[in-house]
Amino acid sequence: MKLFNKLSLKAKLFFFNGILVFFLITVSIVAQVGIHSSNITIEELASNESSHWLNQSLIVKSDIQALLRLAFEPYAISKGVTGAPIKDVTDSLNTFNQNLNKFAAESKFTPEEQEKYKKLVTSWQALREEANKTLENMQKGILKREEINAQIIKIEDAFLNINDILSDILAGLRKKTLTLHTSAQIKEKIYLVGLILLFVLTLLISAFSFIFSIRLNKKFKNISKELFERSNEITTVVTSLKKSSDSLGHAITEQSHSIHDTTAAINQMTSTVNNTTGNTKELYEVSKSSSEKAENGKMIMTHLVTSVETIQKSNEQLQDISEIIVQINSKTTVINDIVAKTELLSLNASIESARAGEQGKGFAVVAEEVGNLAKISGKSAKDIQDLITKSEEQVNKILEITKTRVIEVKGVTNNAQKSFDDISQNVDSLSSFIEKITMATQEQEIGIKQISSAMEQIEKSTQNIQSSIQVTSECTESLVKQGIKLDSSSKEIEILINGTH
């Protein structure tokens, strides 16, 4: 496909028409060869069948004649002179049998022909056996003339029956040959019609190629027109770009004047700024000191917040521990009650089992286990009591920590108050310096107004420059796009006309 695209337009059309001509010639040759081969096959088939059935007819005729000669020689038979005629009959029968077998081996029967051939073979076998039997009896001389005549008539009837069967098969084969011949003629006509249709198709394809060439020429005209329009558009864009450049030049000139005015105003402001600088330095020192004090106050307040949060957490822990102690006390009371009741029940059970004697031994074991469980429960109650004691100690420690933290918070709060007092004094000093800065700022106001006016002019000029630059950018972008389209169209025309290389 890539190689085909590299060809020129003329080469493509020539290649396309060459393929059509080659295809037409190839199909014509194949059709002629097929028709000729079909006719030869039919002629050979007809020739072979005719010669085959001609031989069979001659064999039948010679056999009948031999039998007739044999029938009309009673004297020779009675005298024992029967060798030559009988040998002729035997040879004829053998020859007929061989030809019949050869015919069966070389033929492809249809089901109907196969049935007829089986009937023929059956009749032939019966005839052959009857003929051999008659010949044998004639040689022995045990047949009378009347019997011989009867056998000859019987054999002749059998030959006639075989001849009818052969004629029937021959008629079928001739009909088949005729059908093949007719089919060949029809096929020849179909080939002829196909060639005509192929020729018409070739004409249509050629017409299509001609129409395609016309449309392609029209496409070339459209492309040329489009190129011309693109060229005009590019000219317009370039003109607009030139105007935008001129406008940009004027805007730059105006901006230059505004910059000069701004420079003069800035020079006037320089002296005022120098006076402001000294006051600013003093203000900076005071501000720095205030900043440090404020930072210290911030750190102190941070510690304060941290201490408060710690106290809050300690209170929460105390509250949680208090609740836990209450729950443990309640569980301990329940356990103690259960232990007391269990021990009492165990004692009663032991007494009752002792009274019961042998019958109460099993119950005594249960009572003993219950007593063991009561002891375990008592031990658990003691452990719980120890936990309660430890919890109380922990609560006391937390309370002590809380008191310490409260004292720290008070100290931090006092320090914060002192720091904020210092900050207040520094702020008063800062206010005095700010008044001086305000007076200097008023002197700078006039110069600032001049700068503002000049800056407005600069801003307007800048806006004009930006607008001009934007228009220039758009025009340039459009010019680039048009150039790309123009280049693409040119390449497309070049590819269609000359092909790629």
Image: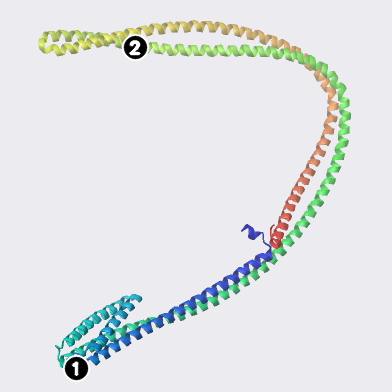
Q: Are marks 1 and 2 in contact (CB under 8 Å)?
A: no
Q: Is residue 361 above or below residue 79?
A: above
Side (left or right) of 470 relative to 394: right
Along the viewing direction, whichever of 64 and 177 lies nearer the viewer: 64
Q: Looking at numbered disc 1 in the image, what kind of residue is underneath it?
A: Pro
Q: Looking at numbered disc 2 in the image, what kind of residue is underneath it?
A: Ser
Q: Is residue 205 above or below residue 305?
A: below
Query: Dividing the image into 4 quarters, which one contains the N terminus?
Result: bottom right
Q: Residue at x 88, y 36 (%)?
A: 257
- Please name which of the two marks, 1 or 2, marks the residue nearer to the observer: 1
Q: Residue at x 77, y 48 (%)?
A: 476
> How far from the left and from the top, in percent, is residue 175?
37, 83
Q: For mark 1, what is the residue? A: 74
Q: Is residue 226 above or below residue 156?
A: above
Asked which secondary structure carries label 2, the reply is helix
**Quadrant housing residue 391:** top left
Q: For mark 2, what is the residue? A: 330
Asked which secondary structure carries label 1, the reply is helix
Along the viewing direction, whichever of 4 and 48 lies nearer the viewer: 48
Side (left or right) of 197 relative to 393: right
